[in-house]
Amino acid sequence: MTTGLDDEELRGRTPRDPASFEPLVERYSAALHGYFARRAPTAVDDLLAELWLQAYATRRGFDPARGSVRAWLFGVARNVLSAHWRWVAAARPDLPRAIGDDDPWEAVDNRLVAAGVAPRLRELLAQLSSDERELLLLVAWEQLTPSEAAAVVGMYPPRRPAPVCTAPATVCARAPPFDLTGDLK
């Protein structure tokens, strides 16, 4: 029985016992499904299937010194998503690149419009690098630790402080204060 083992023990067993990979799928499918749903809602199931195929195929390359199994899986998910976006861009060059089904910020905008802060927040987020935005998303949406998020975007070893800790400060330093109704103070 492998369900009582921790992630690293399970991952370590998979080269000799492929069935021990199944509990990892059970543990992380919901979180990874959410990751894809927020970023590419029209392709979630295909992306999740591709993630598990790639994770299983590359399981021997996992290095526990570079982060947890969870962070590794989110890194694989990020690579799968990037490949998907490249494929969409190549297959459909007529689609606008700024906003589309795969833009995770559109869903955030939809929730913030009522508060009236979306244009300013979007402007501030645009000032962050794509890695800083991804770090914020991984911590806020996927509940990764800053170190896990840093590992996902390829920062080995995670810097101190992780950029996810400085990105909010960057945004906050440039933003006027908002009250709970969304009005500028």
Image (cartoon, helix red, strand yellow):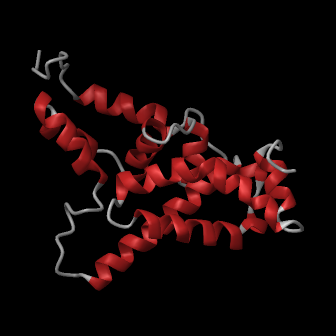
- Lateral position of residue 36 relative to residue 60, left or right: left
Residue shown at the point (48%, 38%) measured from the top left = 139
Residue 59 visible in rendering: yes
> In the rendered image, which quarter is residue 19 located in?
bottom right
Front-most of residues 139 and 131: 139
For the C terminus, which image quadrant?
A: top left
> In the rendered image, which quarter is residue 137 located in?
top left
- Lateral position of residue 150 relative to residue 125, left or right: right
Position in image of residue 75 (x %, y %): 57, 57
- Lateral position of residue 139 relative to residue 51, left or right: left
Residue 155 visible in rendering: no
- Lateral position of residue 98 relative to residue 156, left or right: left
Position in image of residue 146 (x %, y %): 55, 36
Position in image of residue 5 (x %, y %): 83, 44
Please determine whether, in this image, residue 82 is positioned above or below residue 92.
Answer: above
Residue shown at the point (52%, 53%) measured from the top left = 32
Please determine whether, in this image, residue 171 is positioned above or below residue 40.
Answer: above
All told, the count of numbered labels is 0
Front-most of residues 12 and 120: 12
Residue shown at the point (54%, 71%) measured from the top left = 50
Front-most of residues 40 and 140: 40
Position in image of residue 17 (x %, y %): 87, 65
Residue shown at the point (25%, 62%) measured from the top left = 101
Q: Residue placed farthest to the front in the image?
A: 1
